Image (tube, rainbow, N blue to C red):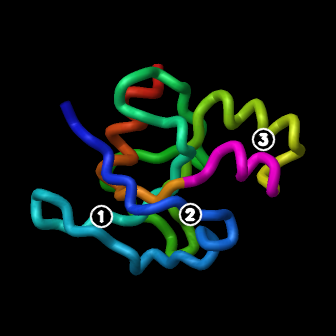
Amino acid sequence: MSSIIVLNYVSGATASLCTPEFKRKNNAGRYSRAAFVCQHLNLEQYKGFGEAFDTYRGMQLDEDDDFQAWCSECEKVRLQSNGWNDESEEFAKIKLICEDCYFELKSLNTK
């Protein structure tokens, strides 16, 4: 079974400061970009998968873009809270992971 490497908890304010230069060398020896996901996404149970924009493995991002995803429950809270704010971010507890882990999560959590 694969495991997700959670680098650390990231608040909304901290996430906005991260740059595309943050990279992690993966097992294949290449660097992968940073990605941000909610605390609920995991590799054991389907949680749904919402993204800031459609993504695919190996895609090139603009400098200002990051991979970002959240579960169905976070989407409900986000909509009830009128978007991302202190309340919805507290529920999501966004984590910083690598791009490779992001796409593993996406594969499991999309239908």
21 is within the stretch colored magenta: no
Q: Which segment did they paint magenta?
A: 86-94
Query: In the image, what residue occupies the spot 76% across and 46% down?
Result: 88
Q: Secondary structure at mark 1?
A: strand
Which residue corresponds to mark 3? 78
Calculate the distance from the C-alpha at mark 2 to the C-alpha at mark 3. Answer: 17 Å
Instruction: Of the two numbered discs 2 and 3 on the same chain, state the one appearing first in sequence.
Output: 2
Calculate the distance from the C-alpha at mark 3 to the C-alpha at mark 1. Answer: 28 Å
Instruction: Of the two numbered discs 2 and 1 on the same chain, state the one appearing first in sequence.
Output: 2
91 is within the stretch colored magenta: yes
Crowd tier of the residue under label 2, counting other residues whose Cα lies within 10 Å: few below 14, some 14–19, many 20 or above: some
Crowd tier of the residue under label 3, counting other residues whose Cα lies within 10 Å: few below 14, some 14–19, many 20 or above: some
Q: Is residue 21 left or right of residue 51?
A: left
Query: In the image, what residue occupies the spot 53% across and 25% down?
Result: 47
Q: Secondary structure at mark 3?
A: helix
Q: Give the answer, above or below, for where 83 lies relative to 97.
A: above
